[in-house]
Amino acid sequence: MDDVDRSRTPDASGAPVGRRVVLGLVGLGAAGVVGGASFSRRLSEWLAPVELRDPTGLIATLPLGPAFRFYSVTGVVEPRDEASYRLEVGGLVAEPATYGLADLRALPQTEFTSDFHCVTGWVVPGVHWVGVPLSELLDRARPAASATAVRFRSFDGTYTESLGLEDARAARTIVALEMLDGPVSHDHGGPVRMYVDGQYGYKSTKWLSAIELTEDEVPGYWEHRGYDVDGTIRG
């Protein structure tokens, strides 16, 4: 889904969340609605260790206001840092390349503010994003005439997603280096993640490790589990 790494707890399944915790979170969620996005973003940071011990997924359904919920499809995701992070760009291209964090920071950047929408219904309004337009990396790679889509891979070793080339080249489809007024944290899919404005969060691959040009749009992790290949937000 959209957004946590279970690496901060030794047992990803953990013990069920107790009734008092659930009731307390409902109250905090109400406070988040009143307090606005800044309160709720702090709430999401506090919530992560609790949510990770909820094998039922119940907390993700609670009315926590405009706060990020955190998800991972693999459990533990080993962090990458300045020294170890690499992003590969390849597939049907004339100029494959590998980028480190410093390389990405040196490229032209764009920034904007946009609402983050999870397909399960929650929204975080007014998230500030900074990153490299995906079109910049595609232009440098020089896609082959046969390439019509882009596939993304996560360094969690499991998650994949894809976009048609038109959506991939959209001005607000970015390789994100910053969000919420700071570097993309590990919990939010950092140090580098995708953000695809106008589409549900499952299209914005976290822990981004590879960008591959392909002949066709390849269904990703959640599409194989019933999600629509077209993640466009409508209505």
Image (cartoon, rainbow, N blue to C red):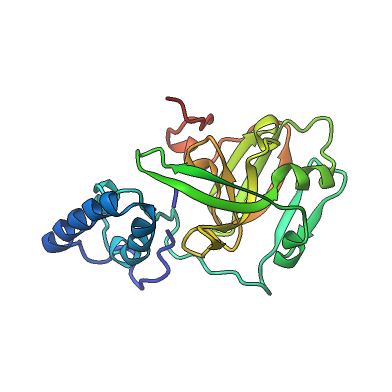
Question: Eyeballing the image, is 199 above or below 6?
Answer: above
User: Which quarter of the figure has residue 22?
Assistant: bottom left
User: Which quarter of the figure has residue 27?
Assistant: bottom left
**Would residue 70 be found to the left or right of residue 95 on screen?**
left
Identify the residue at image location x=61%, y=58%. 192
Q: Residue furthest front?
A: 35
Q: Which residue lies furthest to the top in this view?
A: 235
Image location of residue 80, percent across then percent down: 59, 69
Kindly tell me whether residue 216 is visible in this rendering: no
Question: Eyeballing the image, is 64 above or below 115?
Answer: below
Image location of residue 117, percent across then percent down: 44, 41
Quadrant (top left/top right/bottom left/bottom right) for the C terminus? top left
Q: Which residue lies furthest to the right in this view?
A: 94
Image location of residue 224, percent across then percent down: 48, 37
Identify the residue at image location x=24%, y=50%. 58
Question: Eyeballing the image, is 146 above or below 71?
Answer: above
**Would residue 105 be found to the left or right of residue 221 on screen?**
right
**Would residue 97 be found to the left or right of residue 28 on screen?**
right
| Relative depth, front residue between 25 and 141 | 25
Identify the residue at image location x=56%, y=35%. 219
Image location of residue 175, percent across then percent down: 65, 51
Q: How many numbered tags mark residues here?
A: 0
| Relative depth, front residue between 175 and 161 | 175
Kindly tell me whether residue 14 is visible in this rendering: yes
